[in-house]
Image: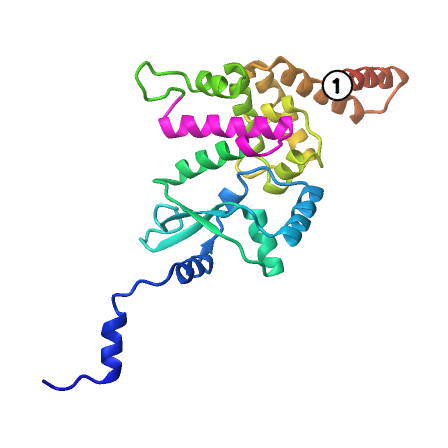
Amino acid sequence: MAKKDFMNIMKEKTSDLRPSLLSSEENIKSQIVILDQLRDLIPPLTGDELHQLELNILKHGVKDPLSIWETTAAIAQIDDSNTPVYVLIDGHNRYDICKKNRLDYRINLLKFTSLDEVKDYMIDFQLGRRNLSPEQASYLRGLRYLQQKSMRGGDKFSTEGQQDVSIALGTEYGVSSRTIKRDGEFASGLNKLSTSLKQEILTGKQKLPKATINAISKLETSEPLESIEQITNELSKNSQVYSTTSEDPQSNQVIKLQSEIREIAKGNLSKYDCESMLSRIHQLLEIL
């Protein structure tokens, strides 16, 4: 038998060796994928919160591992291939700070069967860990309500007795089923806005009444709404339709007053017109 050369012997000895834990982790880190729809799912930190997080990380390092979804491109809906992918599902802010400052971090691999299951996990996880504003909590509860309905094909759990989704989530979060359904309208309305406008509302930079956002959920829009002015115009155009279909009297009143104020302001303002407009503005301010 011919004598094997040194390189062939070394190949045989190393071909079945698995990479070390360290090299595996570094390899995964180099392949982390950011999906916009997952990153934008969670209410953003305010500028002050983000700055404080960066200071804490620079001083103490990253305490908690980043959560990575180990899956394939097809399941993650990236493309139709079975290429392994590693999708970041928790720790987007920490990841950005570490990349910016060239800091190390740990990872935790998780497995899910679908993108919908990941979204449900992310929403529930955020509701349990962060100090949220009432609007942010409402948005996340609403997202979970919409997500659960989507996963189960309607407003029922596919379990024995078919428990209503809104009742189950209301019990879980200590609110009424009606509140959960309104949260769903709130989340649906916010999701019809551009990402930047939605984030500004959730961080408090922009103010928009919850009743108005609930009304937005009933609009048929082909493109995300980009500004408060565009929202007002769209609701004004559809005010008659939504005043008869909306279940929320406060939402109807907001739309009605906005439309009346805009109509009065179009003409030459008499003293009577000014008084009428001021009266409606005061009514609107009381609702807002």
Where residue 151 appears, as percent x and y from the top left, is 38, 30
Provide the residue span drawn in magenta.
127-154
The residue carrying mark 1 is 284
Q: Residue furthest left?
A: 1
Residue placed most toward the observer, 158 or 211: 158
Residue placed most toward the observer, 179 or 78: 179
Where residue 26 appears, as percent x and y from the top left, is 45, 60
Where residue 158 appears, as percent x and y from the top left, is 32, 22
Which of the 4 image quarters holds residue 104?
A: bottom right
Local crowd size for mark 1, using a 10 Å CA cut-off: few (<14), some (14–19), many (≥20): some
Left or right position of 161 against 1: right
| Secondary structure at numbered mark 1 | helix
Q: Is residue 148 magenta?
A: yes
Can residue 226 be spotted in the picture?
A: no
Residue placed most toward the observer, 89 or 282: 89
Name the residue: 53% across, 14% down. 176
Name the residue: 42% across, 60% down. 22
**Image position of 104 with respect to 204: above or below:** below
Q: If the image is split into quadrants, where does the C terminus sit?
A: top right
Can residue 53 be spotted in the picture?
A: yes
Residue type at mark 1 is Leu
Tell how many labels. Answer: 1
Left or right position of 55 against 151: right
Left or right position of 111 against 285: left
Name the residue: 69% across, 45% down. 52
Q: If the image is split into quadrants, where does the N terminus sit?
A: bottom left
**Image position of 147 with respect to 171: above or below:** below
Q: Is residue 30 magenta?
A: no
